[in-house]
Image (cartoon, grey):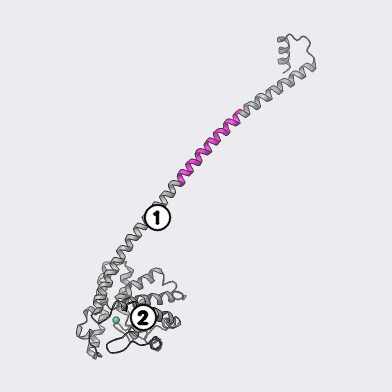
Amino acid sequence: MNKTIQSLCSQFKCEIVTPELINATQLLLSDFADKVDLQLQNDLMSDMMYKYTELSRSLEESNRIIAQREMELKKYSEHLEELVDAKVREISDAQIATIYALVKLAESRDGDTGAHIERTAQLCRLLAEKLRQLPEFSEIIDDEYIENIYRSSPLHDIGKVGIPDAILQKPGKLTPEEYEIMMTHAEIGAKTLEDVAKQYKGNTFIKMGLEIAKGHHEKWDGTGYPNGLSGKDIPLSARIMAIVDVYDALRSKRSYKEGFSHEKSAKIIEEGMGTHFDPLLVGVFLRYQNEFRDLYDSITHSYL
Ligand SMILES: [Fe+2]
């Protein structure tokens, strides 16, 4: 540094070089150097800040575009799902409507109406919903089970298409021989649905329809038909249908009887607890019997 100062002094013809002059020059030079560095740093910093701001803006813009695209994709995907769901529902509803029409046609031969089909479907669903609240059934009965029992329960008497009119439409009591023939409707229905089930192996709706058609006249104590199954060997769906079918038959008017009151019908169901019907299911039916009565009444009135 001193050499630089001395060279400067000689350049500017400064003859007397005192320590004070050296100090002052040193201070000036150091101040100048600081200022130069600071300016450079400031320039660099402001350049970097500018570039950083530009980058941030560009990143924000990219994120905004990505978020917008994601939103559009989500909306499109939801729309697509809705379209698929609507299509599936449409096909499924059309199939169910066709099945119901055939069942109605079959059942009209013995004087039943659409009300019977709708009542059994809704009463089965109600009993299944109540059973679902019990720990014993919470694992077995889910939304799909409830939907299936509602849709497939109308198939329970589909085998009646194979019963001759003379028996099906007989106004009086059936003879033992006629009753034997009448009982075959469970097997005829099961056979028909077994053939369908073979073609649609994974179809839970057909599977449950088959269980119900085959097992709805089985009894808890093993004295029912067609296979004399007892207890839990009878599929749950068929045990549910057994109660609903008998309740509906008791309350409905027939050529040989008037419709019974709810109280009388519920009493008869209670008497069949543990013999005809699963006692646990009867307990639930009795606990919520007012709901079953109201549902039966409202559907019946809506068909009048
Ligand atoms: Fe039946």
The x, y position of residue 56, in whole percent, is 53, 39
The x, y position of residue 217, in whole percent, is 31, 82
| Image height of 152 relative to 32, above or below | below
Circle 2 residues within 10 Å: few <14, some 14–19, many ≥20: many
- In the displayed structure image, the side of residue 8 where residue 77 appears, left or right: left
Res. 244 mark: 2
The amino acid type, in three-letter code, at marker 1 is Glu
Q: Tell me the magenta residue range.
A: 43-67
Query: Could you give the CA–CA distance between mark 2 and mark 1, rounded to whole angstroms?
Result: 40 Å
The amino acid type, in three-letter code, at marker 2 is Val
Residue 50 magenta-highlighted = yes
| Image height of 56 relative to 128, above or below | above
| SS class, disc 2 | helix
Q: Which of these two is toward me, 19 or 51?
A: 51
Residue at image location 43% in from the left, 81% down from the top? 290
Residue 144's quadrant in the figure? Answer: bottom left
Circle 1 residues within 10 Å: few <14, some 14–19, many ≥20: few
| SS class, disc 1 | helix
Q: Which residue is mark 1?
A: 78
- In the displayed structure image, the side of residue 291 where residue 224 appears, left or right: left
Task: Specify whether tag 2 is near ligand 1 (CB below 8 Å).
Answer: no
